[in-house]
Amino acid sequence: MSPRLRKWTSALITILAATLISFVLIRAMPGDFLDLRANELVTTQGLPYATAYKIASSQYNYDPNLPLWQQFVSYFGGLLHGNLGTSMTLRIPVSSVLLQALPWTLFLNFLALLLSFSVGTTLGLLLAWKRRSRVLSGLMNGFAVLSQAIPDFLIGLLLLVFFGVRLRWFPLRGAYDISYTPGFNLPFMFSVLQHAILPAMAYTLSTVGGWMLAMRASATQVLNEEYLLVAQAKGLKSKRIFGRYLARNAIMPPVTQLAIAFASMISGSIFVEWMFAYPGIGYFFGYALGNRDFTLLQGILLVSTLTMVVANLLADAVYSWIDPRVKT
Amino acid sequence: MNLLKTLFDVLRHNRKATVGTLLLVGFVLMALLGPLWLPVNLDSDYLERFQGPSWQHWLGTDYAGRDTLAQLMHGTRDMLLIAFSAALATLAIAMVVGTWAGLSGGWVDSCLMQVIDIMLTLPRFPIMAIFAGLFSIRDPLSFGGVLALFYWPGLARGIRSQILSLRHKEFIEVSRLMNMPMRHIMLGELMPNLVPYLAINFIGVARDAIVASVGIMLLGIVPLSASNWGMMLNMATTQTGAIYVPNAYAYLLAPIVFIVIFQFALMAFASGLEEFFDPRLR
């Protein structure tokens, strides 16, 4: 099997495994939730129990009377048609919950990644360039250690208490002030930004140290290359060497990590979003888990797996595009 | 004995490692002796709630007027147990799978690697949280076990590649040619070369396990004893509104500071270990 084919089959198997896991999850749930839902339909809509049971079973895309493999086939078939079932507690299709939540998560993570990547790589570059400055490197090393020792959601908690509760500079919960109408108007966009700053800072502060160290390592390696010596020997201005020779070459390895970092941020965003009640995928995951909303859980699990798989494929593609030696 | 002396020397001379080791010893002592010195009293006394630090309560009191320091010290035991059991179980699973894949090669190797690849691509936090919720965990040791189920793949892959690179080194070839028993090759030749890698990763997994466990408890999925650091944060942030009470800052900050110090201690200790295993760093 060629490596590329292997990657794609591996991606497919991973997605299958995720569906299987989410399928097993729904079977492991305590209590007969179909019965609950059916009884509810009987009382609210006055349907006979058998009909109500059928409706409930199609809503959750789940029928316990069939043999196990047929259940999986019908569940999987539903997935292929984009039917993720109905959320057990929110009473709307899981897919529409996901469609509402995903943009917020993407926006927040994009903002945070932009901030941490640009600041982190700049600092790392400066650190490698000014490697003889003991004060600077001591300060930055201290910061890197500290940022690695505090998990992002605890940084979030500290920011929330200090800037949100004490100073009241930023709002505590949600993604925007509901008194504004969503759309392309200035107050709404300002409100969105205002709500995103603290959670984005939580991610940024906890990841910026990692980018800094990665960039410093990469830049230090470039500094030892002979073409840099040649550039200096030619008498090029150090500004030009810094920008054209050092920065451009050193940025490549960190860039290849972007896709993976983005994906793992999305699947790791539960705690920060939960802390700020930011209505993204992670927040709804915490909600679904707390309220035992298993259809919603399944959907979120599938979406985050898909993100990871796509990011992995993307990272591979980017990597072999940048460095043709690994082309397979 | 000689090795222990070297370890001690390294830990003493590397300033960072000294601090880390002392802090770790402090945490162990706190877990063992703390509850004897300051027993946890979970009776509520609402007149004393949300007090700042004082001589009576060094780190203030919580939402029900209970001493924060006593709870934190009591919770240290749980945290150490979670970190230790998670790291140990991860190491055990990873060792078995990693050496199995590395030594057998062929289709066994590719199957195992495929499984590892899948496990690494699956979003870890969500699945871990779901498992922790489904199995209604009540004690720190099984919590560590559940975490280990999701932390072994990365380490197993690392061990496999270590073994692959060691496998064709001369000293292994020689011991094979000399018809030494497999057990000797494994334990006498391979293991000593793996120990540094394993030890450093042991600490890494312990650190990750602490972060993951605190996060999961913060979501309120795993109801461990109320004095656990994660549970304290959960109570403070989501249940009792302590974040809005100006006087409760000590109660809120103390668990965070403890977690950070514990993380730092492990990191610093690891840097000492690295130096111990790699004489070139000394």
Image (spheres, grey):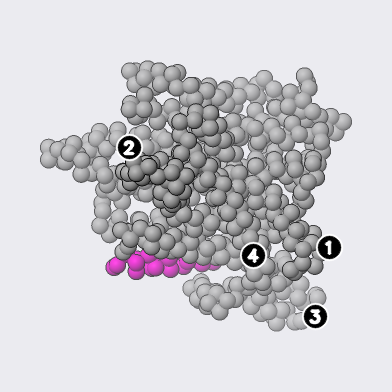
Q: Quadrant of residue A102?
A: bottom right
Q: CA distance from mark 4 to mark 1?
A: 20 Å
Sooner in the amino-acid sequence: mark 3 or mark 4 = 3
The amino acid marked with disc number 2 is Leu
In this rendering, which labeled residue sits more in front, label 2 or label 4?
4
Instruction: Provide the residue designation for mark 4.
Output: A103
**Which element type, helix, strand or loop, lies under badge 4?**
helix
Disc 2 marks which residue?
B194
Q: Are the two marked residues, 3 and 4, in contact with CB atoms closer than 8 angstroms?
A: no
Q: CA distance from mark 2 to mark 4?
A: 45 Å
Question: Residue B120, located in which quarter of the rendered image?
Answer: bottom left
Does mark 4 fall on the same chain as mark 2?
Answer: no
Q: Is residue A178 left or right of residue B100?
A: right
Q: CA distance from mark 1 to mark 3?
A: 38 Å
Residue numbers of the magenta segment: A1-25
Disc 1 target residue: A179
Crowdedness near tag 1: few (<14), some (14–19) or many (≥20) residues, C-alpha within 10 Å: few
* Whether marks 2 and 1 lie on the same chain: no
Q: Residue A46: which disc?
A: 3
Give the letter of the chain under mark 1: A
Disc 4 or 1, which lies upstream in sequence?
A: 4
Secondary structure under the numbered disc 3 in the rendered image: loop
Foreground of the two, B161 or B225: B161
Which image quarter: residue B93? top left
